[in-house]
Image: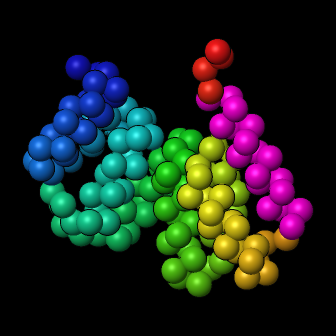
Amino acid sequence: ANDPVAMLRKGIEQHRKGDYGSAFEYYVKAAELGDAAAQYELGRLYESGKGVEKDEGKAIHFLEEAAIGGHPRARNNLGCDEEESGNIERAVKHWIIAAAQGDDDSIKALMEAFKSGVVSKNDLAAALRAHQAAVDATKSPQ
């Protein structure tokens, strides 16, 4: 009953069926037990307004909780939100962290920021190395 992974799986199952209300309930239970992926999914539901009333503040809250819990997609999304708000320096910080966790979209965002002169060559190179190390660490040995 207190298994956050099982709760998350049930939530994803309900989400895929389009039952966002049930998905929300399962995600809340898993998030309360500290599951970063469930916190990320709650953030996405609040962003989209599926199964809950759309609430940007709650969306950001759950994305932040998930990012603190080590969820790279949540961290990337926070970077995108910061970029949209004109806080490019904060966006870059989020993307560097997400890239170091293996998030490909954050690398793409950092490359774009480099092209526009916001990210230095050294910072981009460091992010690429950290990203590659994260990707290599998740590969199974042959």
Q: Is residue 81 depicted above or below 93 in this figure?
A: below
Q: Nearer the viewer, residue 37 or 121?
A: 121
Q: Main secondary structure of the magenta part?
A: helix
The percent position of residue 67, horizontal first and vertical second, equals 53, 50
Residue 110 in view: yes
The percent position of residue 69, horizontal first and vertical second, equals 53, 41
Q: Is residue 130 depicted above or below 62 in this figure?
A: above
Q: Is residue 51 depicted above or below 131 in this figure?
A: below
Q: Indicate yes or no whether the magenta region holds residue 7.
A: no
- Residue for point 80% across, 46% down: 129
The percent position of residue 124, horizontal first and vertical second, equals 80, 61
Residue 94 in view: no
- Residue for point 41% across, 35% down: 35
Q: Nearer the viewer, residue 90 or 15?
A: 15
The residue positioned farthest toward the right in the image shown: 122
**Magenta highlight range:** 121-138
Q: Is residue 28 depicted above or below 108 in this figure?
A: above
Give the quarter of the figure containing the C terminus.
top right
- Residue for point 62% across, 29% down: 138
The residue positioned farthest toward the top in the image shown: 142
23 sits left or right of 81 in the view: left
Place residue 87 in its image quadrant.
bottom right
Q: Nearer the viewer, residue 98 or 43?
A: 98
The percent position of residue 33, horizontal first and vertical second, equals 37, 32
4 sits left or right of 117 in the view: left
Q: Nearer the viewer, residue 68 or 47?
A: 47
